[in-house]
Amino acid sequence: MPPGADEQPERPWWEGAVVYQIYPLSFCLADPDGRRARLERAAEPFADRLVEGAGDLEGIRRHLDHVASLGADAIWLSPFYPSPMADLGYDVSDYCDVSPLFGDLDGFDRLVAEAHGLGLKVLVDWVPNHTSDRHPWFLDARRSAASAHRDFYIWRDRDDSEPARPPNNWRRAFGEGPAWTFDDATGQWYLHLFLPGQPDLNWANAAVAEAMEEVLDFWLDHEVDGFRIDVAHALGKPDGLPDAPAGSATIPYSSQIDDRSTHEILRRLRRHTDRAARPPLLLGEVFLLETAKVAPYYGEGDELQLAFNFTPMYSRFSASSFRRRLTEIGEHLGSRGAVPTWVLSSHDASRHRSRYGGSMRRARAAAVLSLAMRGTVFLYAGEELGLEDAVVEGEAVLDPGGRDGCRAPIPWSPAPEHGWSLRGAAPFLPFPPEADRLDVETESSDPASMLALYRELTALRRRSPALRLGDLVLEEAGDDEVLAFSRSEGAERCLVLVNFAGSPRQVSLGHGLEVAACSGGDSGRSSPGGLFPGELGPEEAVICSWPPPGPGLRG
Ligand code: NOJ
């Protein structure tokens, strides 16, 4: 049959999928002996606390069943590559290997094969904007201004000013300071949008693109299904490297840079990966906090297939802010047929339960909200347990960007070492609060737990084409503090209601519809399988199914 009106275009696997982010340092330590043996052969030492108390790939492999039972479609692994760990792995010194801290390539292959066996796709982090200053390319570049890899990086002469003034006003991320470091040995400045130990690659040099495409091919040969591209929006630098506008000069330039040359780079990468036997997903981190600025990174369907949109993550927990976000997403992404992304927590920001004030009730409502969204939903390991940030102070501080709290180790059991093979050593960061109650083992046997709620929600999303793939239309609930939207696909419909207020609210729609999921637990107004009573409890969220040819939304 020729492609015609009756034929539904095939949807890519990531549309509507749930992706589970694993930060390898934080997930689980399972094989301390293997680590010791590998580190004896390694050239560079690591801090004791990482050696004794950080997670490894084996810990991830052993807990893949948890991810599968959570109902995720894919895992995304934050960096596990050789790295001096100045930015805890986002400073890569070898793109085509596994750090001895985490494991080895055989272990990685085993992990991928087992994930695939459980039906989980595997995305890896790819860090193309910068290398570590210990990467062989940079070591060579630094050797002399004439070295073969000099032009892999971005160098500028110094002017005559005293003291020496950096080539422009760009600020680096993490700590105060310019995005430039002067290299005494070769007498030039080099650019680093992040730490001085993370020199920016020069993507205007075709040799960089070629070398980095080889990295993608390497991991495709290791059967990965996609790449999360670190700071994808920063790859192209504006011609002449002009100053940032005076008004935003104190903001790190990495969250402002938005040059058109990046789009050509992304198109090139997409052409390259689309030629692969199994074209992978290119998911870009576009750290520009306006949906309108994120949207162009999908190109005309020829750049990123998915781009992170962080505006909801940095929004207040209120109906009006989420209504605004949904309107913007409809306007800017819907209009170009782009699949939106939803992230409430990650390794870069305070966990959303903490950000929303610590209330478990709110975190439960947020779980319903996020898993009812249109697009691809990203869960950050530990949010399914309702974890809050750990308090990390003084000597315990590790991250130059102040993000240790959300990277605390995942508790697997209530026992003192929480399922980590610590053998009496301290974990690399303290466990999060209530780790002896908010752990996988305890929550698995409690039908009222946050984990049980996440499992119900992902199962519902899998069963319901409307929730997974359907359109999203904002509805009026008759109360400003209640966010309402409907999802529909074919004949199936769902109505999602979220009460952001701390008091019960009557709503003008949904009465008598069947409740498919709700956040309130024992104290909620609704329960799954019951009929929606027309009232939401304080900070309660509900998903009702709207069976055809059922009543209209108005009760
Ligand atoms: C974004 C990553 O998510 C973050 O963790 C990292 O520090 C920066 N990019 C620099 O690579």
Image (spheres, rainbow, N blue to C red):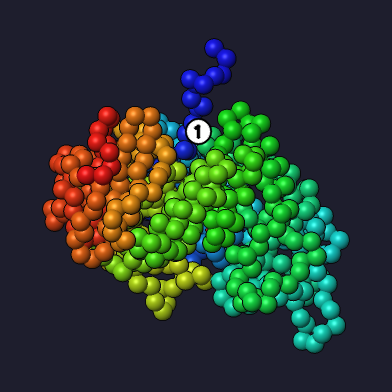
> Residue 44 placed where, x, y %?
58, 61
Rate crowding at label 1 as few (under 14), some (14 to 19) or many (20 or more) other CA atoms within 10 Å: few
Three-letter amino acid code of the residue under disc 1:
Pro
Q: Is residue 19 left or right of residue 66?
A: right
Does 402 sit above or below residue 442? below
> Residue 59 placed where, x, y %?
38, 48
Viewer-nearest residue: 225 or 185:
225
> Residue 486 placed where, x, y %?
35, 43
Task: Please indicate, yes or no, whether residue 101 appears anywhere in the rendered image.
Answer: no
Q: Quadrant of the C terminus?
A: top left
Q: Is mark 1 within 8 Å of ligand 1?
A: no
| The furthest residue to the bottom | 162
Q: Quadrant of the N terminus?
A: top right
Does 531 sit above or below residue 389? above
Looking at the image, how many numbered discs can be counted on the residues? 1
Residue 427 found in image quarter: bottom left
Task: Please indicate, yes or no, whether residue 184 appears anywhere in the rendered image.
Answer: yes
**SS for dot 1:** loop
Q: Is residue 5 left or right of residue 140?
A: left
- Identify the residue at image location x=31%, y=40%: 494
Q: Is residue 525 left or right of residue 133?
A: left
- Identify the residue at image location x=23%, y=66%: 502
> Residue 94 placed where, x, y %?
62, 52
Viewer-nearest residue: 188 or 206:
206
Residue marked by disc 1: 12
- Identify the residue at image location x=71%, y=42%: 268
- Identify the residue at image location x=69%, y=61%: 200
Residue 270 found in image quarter: top right
